[in-house]
Image (cartoon, rainbow, N blue to C red):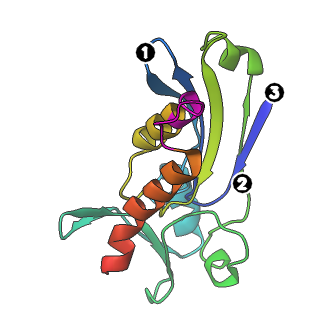
Amino acid sequence: AIVSANIGDSSSLIAVYSKTEQKSHIIFSNRKDKPHLPSEKERIEAHGGVVVPPKMFHGELLSSRAFNIDKNIGLAMSRVFGDIDAQRIGVIAEPIVQVLSIKSILDKFHDEDIMFAIVMSDGTVQDVKEQEVVDELGKALNDQDSLDAKGMMEVLQDLIMKSSKSWLST
């Protein structure tokens, strides 16, 4: 089995690059721990927290947030390590654990395909979609012996720069 234990709003993915299709397929994506999810919202509100749902701001969808009643503590996730103030409003440090059958994963690809996993922060996938990340990485893994292909480090640097543009412009 493959065990995924996630806390926070980072992304853990398992993908397969199909050499015949020349495309990557996401076969596992962890759940993102957001305050607006029904079970998370219920827990936060039971602890006196306030959940503000996702909203649009200057054309960008902002994450939901968990606040204390005075709205001076705001967190864009419902599970986190080490934030004692957030724990007072029902934000917990208990990960979501998902157990994946290796057989079910292996059934989804052929011998010539490339399976890979990636873990990224929420900032990485804010402006770059998960599918774009796995497409670029799958292609780089497939083409690694080709002289004209982008190297893995170059692909990763390009993805980081693309995702960081919005952070740098604010």
Who's the residue at 47% across and 11% down the image? 20
Q: Nearer the viewer, residue 141 or 34?
A: 141
Front position among marks 1 and 2: 1
Q: Is residue 70 above or below residue 9?
A: below
Q: What residue type is disc 3 on?
A: Ala
Who's the residue at 55% across and 45% down the image? 151
Which residue does the numbered mark 2 point to in the structure image?
Answer: 95
Q: Is residue 165 above or below residue 143?
A: below
- The mark total stands at 3
Which residue does the numbered mark 1 point to in the structure image?
Answer: 21
User: Which quarter of the rendering shows the N terminus?
Assistant: top right
Is 118 situated left or right of 4 in this image? left
Is 3 situated left or right of 74 in this image? right
**Residue 150 makes an appearance in the image:** yes
Q: Which residues are magenta?
A: 140-150
Rendered location of residue 108, percent (x, y): 60, 14
